[in-house]
Image (cartoon, rainbow, N blue to C red):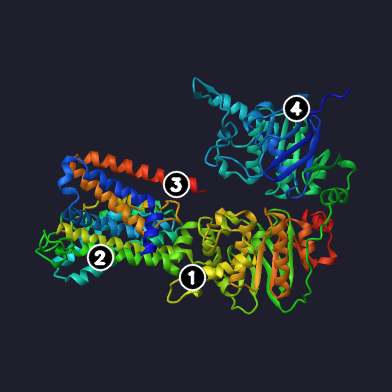
């Protein structure tokens, strides 16, 4: 009676350099089953999906598809063997028609010419499987709504008649009504025996659409079971239940006057509404899922993105002037989450990177005094123990942790009184992390105001005085740290509170 | 002096390249007698002036991560403007100001369009290439603009062609090269140019008004191109709206051979000047060897590819 599982993974391991992305992952999915894959940012979901879809190879472990060993060599190979993936970011060629997109790379041809009639029939069949046979096949993909574009994307995946379809955050850009239509399509596919791996941060959604679940935590399978028997609390505990280490120094500090006041700020499409107050000597943490609008809030405060509504007031600065250059003048500093693409000039020296906001102060009459510039940089290199030959070394040659120290030192050298830090510890080693925690703590003790965005909850709970949680573009709740737990934050962040 | 030798050493590639082409052209029997003489170098230097001054402006633009394809047309336009004003009886100083101003205006428009419309410099300046060339022909009524005589004519020659003195144009180019090097290396403006080219997002993040900076860079570079146009006028002794077609490519090549990166953030004035000299030596040597012009074009094309390839190898080894 027990047929082999449609897809079975056991003991999967994957390592990138010194990072163990996957330690021990097991997963089993039956035919015609919708299986939710759940986990925090960085738990290893993307790596696992890349292994399944052939983009990476596993270091160890077994993969079986319908009882036979499965080792895809490339995404193309995976598709041929029956595993197709729908990515979160759609991959349509927006200028080509719906039909051309569905058949891209798999066109019906006769003697090298596209066979339009056969192509049309196959595109229609794929759409019919999803219940969308009336879609206009000749319209350019760019002129469909996001939901319809997703249907086109799924239809393309169905063309090869996959046994397993992986959907990564399929509802992240859909409205409620479109989500319902997607669920209807998923139900049809399930009835046709297609197995679906459904990845989403939104637990309520997972509960509605999935039959079974697997929770990943720190690269391991933390739990698996039937959706019907699982409570939201149980899932959240599986996601977050881990030890909190004593990495976080607490300094004595008493919050002073309000430094930053944000009222009903909105910056579409991501940031819909956020209000908050930050005081001198306070560390304010922003939690939330990726795409919840945390970064967008910081960027809007700093003037990198335009405000569509609401106000941002840096106390003590004249209103109205809010470009980054004005913010620096007002004593606001911003650390980008994207060190390589935005935070640093990788080809320029440590000294150039460190002093870029205040070159004018390092000389007279528009000239830069190279000696003073290096002296300023050398001071921070020593103080933060940045590992580099000297401050003339290009920033791109430093390790991630040391690059981050250089980026952060720019705010210290300026010096800022309000620090906006976006994922300050992402992708850096533990030693540098501890050092950054110490530094942030010392800044607050010295009366600076700090706003930190982080996806790592122990860090926020360990470091911050106040934590705000964002969900789908809104700052949903702001409370003192003592009133939060990891599980509670996840509940608010996943919209299941 | 020590700093200079060190700079030349780090500038290694282009400098060695320059020595190499000079040595190569001084060996064959056809050129041995004349090539290595002072008089020939005076000719080479004079022939470099226009490309060198253009390369100064282009170095600013390329280091900032941009490109300007309209240089040849700007030079033709400003030389026509200069010639018309000379014919009207203007003195050399006002003509100089007007030509530099005209070049600067074209640059200003380029910069404003690039920053304001958020379009790529390649497209905008490709458009200006046509607009400036057409305007030059329109102003000149599609023929050369002749005038009786002007002190301008003496800027690219010396009164006695056999004297050891260098013409004014050479000194102007050298002086401007020093000024531009100081501007690029030691001023806030120069550092911002490097920052813009190295990572525009970082520049914006750090409060640099990038649109304004772009306008300033193209306008300043345009002033250099206007001056180059005036020297073009001085050399031809007439305003020719069809002159300097494709000269932008020689100028860009000089900057690239000199070690600048088309991705921005990398480049030096000294390198660009050496690049301009390499191009001039190649032309001069090829002529003396009696090679046809098409052969010169092939050689220069190869030199560009080899120079940039060697630079890639060097960078790759360092990383």
- Residue lying at the far right in this picture: please name it: A229
Residue A182 shown left or right of residue B6 in the figure: right
Q: Is residue A133 visible?
A: no
What mark, if any, has residue B314 been given in the picture? 3
Which tag, 1 or 4, sits closer to the chain's start? Answer: 4
Q: Which residue is mark 1?
A: A371
Contact, mark 1 vs mark 4 (Cβ under 8 Å) = no
| Distance Cα–Cα, label 1 vs label 2 | 30 Å
Residue denoted by label 4: A65
Chain for mark 2?
B
The residue sitting at 43% across, 69% down in the picture is: B187
- Tell me: residue B38, above or below residue A256: above
The quadrant of the picture occupied by the N terminus of chain B is bottom left
- Seen from the viewer's position, the closer of residues B78 and A444 is A444
Do the residues at pointers 1 and 4 share their chain? yes
Query: Percent position (x, y) of residue A307?
Result: 61, 65
Q: Are marks 1 and 2 in contact (CB under 8 Å)?
A: no
In the rendered image, residue B43, in percent from the top left (x then y), is placed at 18, 54
Residue that numbered label 2 is attached to = B172
Mark closer to the observer (2, 3) = 3
């Amino acid at each position: 009676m027990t047929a082999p599982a449609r897809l079975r993974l056991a003991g999967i391991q994957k390592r990138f350099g010194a990072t163990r992305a996957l330690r021990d992952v097991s997963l089993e999915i039956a035919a015609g089953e919708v299986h939710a894959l759940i986990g925090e940012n960085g738990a290893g979901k993307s790596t696992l999906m890349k292994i399944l879809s052939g983009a990476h190879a596993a270091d160890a472990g077994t993969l079986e598809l319908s009882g036979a060993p499965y080792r895809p060599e490339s995404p193309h190979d995976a598709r041929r063997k029956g595993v197709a993936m729908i990515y979160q970011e759609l991959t349509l060629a927006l200028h080509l028609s719906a039909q051309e997109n569905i058949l891209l790379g798999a066109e019906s041809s006769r003697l090298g010419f596209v066979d339009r009639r056969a192509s049309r029939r196959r595109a229609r069949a794929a759409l019919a499987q999803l219940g969308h046979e009336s879609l206009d096949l000749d319209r350019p993909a760019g002129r469909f709504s996001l939901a319809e574009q997703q249907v086109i994307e799924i239809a393309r995946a169905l063309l090869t008649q996959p046994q397993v379809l992986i959907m990564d955050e399929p509802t992240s850009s859909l409205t409620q009504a479109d989500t319902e239509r997607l669920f209807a399509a998923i139900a049809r596919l399930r009835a046709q025996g297609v197995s679906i791996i459904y990845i989403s941060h939104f637990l309520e959604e997972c509960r509605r659409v999935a039959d079974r679940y697997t929770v990943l935590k720190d690269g391991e399978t933390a739990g698996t079971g039937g959706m019907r028997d699982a409570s939201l609390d149980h899932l959240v505990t599986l996601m977050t239940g881990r030890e909190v280490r004593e990495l976080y120094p607490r300094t004595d500090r008493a919050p002073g006057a309000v430094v930053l006041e944000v009222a009903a700020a909105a910056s579409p499409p991501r940031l819909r509404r956020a209000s908050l107050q930050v005081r001198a000597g306070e560390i304010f943490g922003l939690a939330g899922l990726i795409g919840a609008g945390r970064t967008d809030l910081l960027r809007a405060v700093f003037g990198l993105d335009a405000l569509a509504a609401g106000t941002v007031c840096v106390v003590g600065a004249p209103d109205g002037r809010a470009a980054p250059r004005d913010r620096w003048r007002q004593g606001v500093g911003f650390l980008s989450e994207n060190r390589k693409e935005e935070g640093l000039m990788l080809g320029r020296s440590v000294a150039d990177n460190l002093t870029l906001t205040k070159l004018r102060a390092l000389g007279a009459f528009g000239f830069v005094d190279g000696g003073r510039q290096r002296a300023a940089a050398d001071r921070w290199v020593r103080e933060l123990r940045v590992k580099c030959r000297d401050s003339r070394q290009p920033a791109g040659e430093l390790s991630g942790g040391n690059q981050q120290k250089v980026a952060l030192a720019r705010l210290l050298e300026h010096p800022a009184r309000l620090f906006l830090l976006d994922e300050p510890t992402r992708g850096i080693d533990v030693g540098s992390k501890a050092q950054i925690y110490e530094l942030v703590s010392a800044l607050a003790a010295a009366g600076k105001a700090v706003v930190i965005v982080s996806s790592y909850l122990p860090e926020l709970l360990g470091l911050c005085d106040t934590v705000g949680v964002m969900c789908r573009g809104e700052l949903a709740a702001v409370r003192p740290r003592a009133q939060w737990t990891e599980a509670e934050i996840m509940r608010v962040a996943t919209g299941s509170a | 002096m020590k700093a200079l030798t060190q700079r030349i050493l780090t500038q290694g590639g282009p400098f060695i390249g320059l020595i190499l082409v000079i040595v190569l052209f001084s060996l064959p029997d056809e050129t041995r007698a004349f090539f290595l003489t002072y008089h020939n170098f005076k000719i080479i230097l004079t022939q470099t002036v226009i490309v060198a001054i253009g390369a100064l402006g282009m170095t600013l633009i390329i280091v900032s991560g941009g490109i300007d394809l309209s240089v040849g047309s700007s030079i033709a336009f400003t030389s026509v403007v200069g010639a018309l004003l000379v014919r009207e009886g203007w003195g050399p100083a006002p003509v100089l100001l007007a030509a530099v101003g005209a070049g600067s205006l074209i640059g200003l428009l380029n910069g404003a369009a690039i920053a304001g419309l958020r379009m790529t410099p390649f497209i905008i300046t490709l458009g200006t290439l046509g607009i400036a060339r057409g305007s030059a022909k329109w102003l000149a009524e599609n023929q050369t603009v002749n005038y009786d005589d002007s002190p301008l004519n003496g800027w690219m020659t010396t009164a006695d062609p056999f004297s050891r003195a260098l013409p004014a144009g050479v000194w102007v180019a050298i002086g401007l090269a020093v000024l531009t090097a100081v501007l690029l290396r030691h001023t806030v403006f120069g550092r911002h140019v490097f920052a813009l080219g190295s990572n525009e997002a970082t520049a914006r993040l750090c409060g640099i008004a990038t649109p304004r900076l772009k306008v300033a860079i193209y306008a300043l570079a345009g002033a250099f191109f206007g001056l180059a146009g005036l020297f073009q006028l001085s050399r031809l002794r007439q305003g020719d709206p069809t002159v300097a077609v494709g000269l932008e490519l020689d100028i860009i090549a000089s900057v690239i051979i000199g070690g600048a990166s088309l991705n921005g953030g990398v480049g030096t004035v000294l390198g660009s000047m050496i690049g301009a000299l390499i191009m001039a030596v190649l032309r001069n040597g090829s002529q003396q060897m009696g090679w046809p012009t098409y052969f010169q074009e092939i050689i220069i094309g190869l030199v560009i590819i080899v120079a940039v390839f060697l630079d890639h190898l060097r960078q790759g080894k360092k990383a």
